[in-house]
């Protein structure tokens, strides 16, 4: 099936329902949304020669037209290549070339970056009159039928090192992800408003599908991105809001809610994931905002869909193993199997730590034009995630770290996450990232890079004593480094590689 069929169905079933909103302003109902997608698709085909299977890239900031373009591409059976709008023009250019894109959608605010790309590729600006005229034109009555394995979304991994790889997601993958959303994450309804406070080019955008299916409102905040105060205000204005938020966004939302003396009223669901959520942070978030949280664990290669820790588990404070479960990323989503393997690639029993592997219909087709990388990542259908963790006997998965982040000190593996969890229970520590730094005696030593709360005193001994109270002596950081902020990528993930480089220079 073609995922655009869900838009077509909603346009028939709920033509007048508000579909696309900027802030509280309705830009299009479902009838208009689908008609625009069809018209944009028709133009792609007639003017730009885009054929089924061709790739069309998008390098633009969050806006409602983003969805018109995505669905326009799918309407005619082509594949979308959404590019993070914060990338350098040259990086975007590299992606377009690698993907063999036929055309690039841009917006006024990315056009100037794109100029640096130096890639001869036709562009179409969604801010131009031409686009506004074209979307009012005529298009095919229904989306072109597609097979399950046909490419829908070429998703370039954010990659903290090296060149990004193009993850090939099929219509079938997106369907599997969406069905898991219904089964394991949340139950969206037509009255809901899904808020895109994170980039549409990434996970937040992927969650449009279940919401298109039920005919919910798709809301791009006026700021186009994440502003905690704006989110809290929109929650109250729009009601029944759901959103995807990286853990750093959740933190900022909780801080803002505390400042305002609010509890996130009007926000139905916050799906968090994409990076570690520390126990201290999620407990604080729930104490401030209540039971609005669902966690997912996934990666571009199995988008948003490996495990989930549902709302129910966030609330089970009476469960004997509550804290253990809250610190986990939950259990396998409905279409997925998860296993842990050892260094020899063989599955390990419950309780043992090793590489996390996932198998199921959400797993990518492979990497675009990169058979070696595809063969390394996929073995007999099992996706090697590069993440390290353990499963308990009930199937709850607890992540330790990325395999490359594990610190080997004195021949013993130390998982930075454990050290970070321990330090974060200290009220004066705002953020922490533990890394391994080469050391002549130990091989590597644990260095804790920390951002303190305002007014807190940088005192190694105090933090050392705090660690001793909860983790083994040998895991304690041998050095504490105090920083004004931690280096993060465009999705808010801490760049451990950058931290390691920083520390190597010291
Ligand atoms: P990306 O492909 O850029 O979405 O990054 C995926 C990676 O983010 C995963 O392989 C994990 O290392 C990390 N990640 C995703 N979800 C979680 C989560 N819930 N908790 C901890 N780390 C996560």
Image (tube, rainbow, N blue to C red):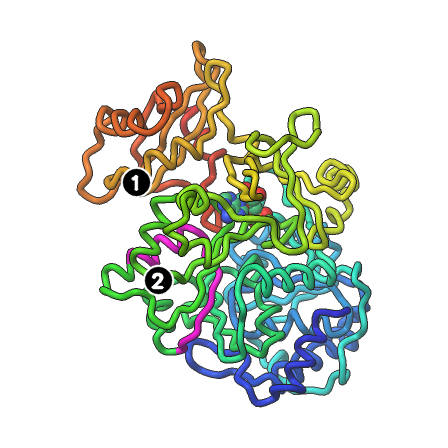
Dot label at residue 398? none
Q: Position of residue 445 (x, y in %)?
A: 42, 20
Picture coordinates of residue 361, whole percent (x, y): 72, 54
Q: Which quadrant of the structure image shows residue 119? A: bottom right
- Give the x, y percent position of residue 505: 41, 24
Around disc 1, counting alpha carbons within 10 Å, would you say few (fewer than 14), some (14 to 19), or many (20 or more)? few
Residue 282 in sight? yes
**Residue located beneath label 2 in the image:** 228
Q: Are marks 2 and 1 in contact (CB under 8 Å)?
A: no
The response on whether ligand 1 sits within 8 Å of label 2 is no
| Relative to 174, residue 402 above or below | above
Which of the numbered marks, if any, corresponds to residue 484?
Answer: 1
Residue 94 showing in the rendered view: no
Q: Nearer the viewer, residue 467 or 40?
A: 467
Q: Which residues are magenta?
A: 238-255
Tag nearer the camera, 2 or 1: 2
Residue occupying image coordinates x 71% and y 58%: 173
Identify the image quadrant of residue 71: bottom right
Residue 159 or residue 506, whichever sits in front: 159
**Element assignment for label 1:** loop
Q: Position of residue 293 (x, y in %)?
A: 43, 58
């Amino acid at each position: 099936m073609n995922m655009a069929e869900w838009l077509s169905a909603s346009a028939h079933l709920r033509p007048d329902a508000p579909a696309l909103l900027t802030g509280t302003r309705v830009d299009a109902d479902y009838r208009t949304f689908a008609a625009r997608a069809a018209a944009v698709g028709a133009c792609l085909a007639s003017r730009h020669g885009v054929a089924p299977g061709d790739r069309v890239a998008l390098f633009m900031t969050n806006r409602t037209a983003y969805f018109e373009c995505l669905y326009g591409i799918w309407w005619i059976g082509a594949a979308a290549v959404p590019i993070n709008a914060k990338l350098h023009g040259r990086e975007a250019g590299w992606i377009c070339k690698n993907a063999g894109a036929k055309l690039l959608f841009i917006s006024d605010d990315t056009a100037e970056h794109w100029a640096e790309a130096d890639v001869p590729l036709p562009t179409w600006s969604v801010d131009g009159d031409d686009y506004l005229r074209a979307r009012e034109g005529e298009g095919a009555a229904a989306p072109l039928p597609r097979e399950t394995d046909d490419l829908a979304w070429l998703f370039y991994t954010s990659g903290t090192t090296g060149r990004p790889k193009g993850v090939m997601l099929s219509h079938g993958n997106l369907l599997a992800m969406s069905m898991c959303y219904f089964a394991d994450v949340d139950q969206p309804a037509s009255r809901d408003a899904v808020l895109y406070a994170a980039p549409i080019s990434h996970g937040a955008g992927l969650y449009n599908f279940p919401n298109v299916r039920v005919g919910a409102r798709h809301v791009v905040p006026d700021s186009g991105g994440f502003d905690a105060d704006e989110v809290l205000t929109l929650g109250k204005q729009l009601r029944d809001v759901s959103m995807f938020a990286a853990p750093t966004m959740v933190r900022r939302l909780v801080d803002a809610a505390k400042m305002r003396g609010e509890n996130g009223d009007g926000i139905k669901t916050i799906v968090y994931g994409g990076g570690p959520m520390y126990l201290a942070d999620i407990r604080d978030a729930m104490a401030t905002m209540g039971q609005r949280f669902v966690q997912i664990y996934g990666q571009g290669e199995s988008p948003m869909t490996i495990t989930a820790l549902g709302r129910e588990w966030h609330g089970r404070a009476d469960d004997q193993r509550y804290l253990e479960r809250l610190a986990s990323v939950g259990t396998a989503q409905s279409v997925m199997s998860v296993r842990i393997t050892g260094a020899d690639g063989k599955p390990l029993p419950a309780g043992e730590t090793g590489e996390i592997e996932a198998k199921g219909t959400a797993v990518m087709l492979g990497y675009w034009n990169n058979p070696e990388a595809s063969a390394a990542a996929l073995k007999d259908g099992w996706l090697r995630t590069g993440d390290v963790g353990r499963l308990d006997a009930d199937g709850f998965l607890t992540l330790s770290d990325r395999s490359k982040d594990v610190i080997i000190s004195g021949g013993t593996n130390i998982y930075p996450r454990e050290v970070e969890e321990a330090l974060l229970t200290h009220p004066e520590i705002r953020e922490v990232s533990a890394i391994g730094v080469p050391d002549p005696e130990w091989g590597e030593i644990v260095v804790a890079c920390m951002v303190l709360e305002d007014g807190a005193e940088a005192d190694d001994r105090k933090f050392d004593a705090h660690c001793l109270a909860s983790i083994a002596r040998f895991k304690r950081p041998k050095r504490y480094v105090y920083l004004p902020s931690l280096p993060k990528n465009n999705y808010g993930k801490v760049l451990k590689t950058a931290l390691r480089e920083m520390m190597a220079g010291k």
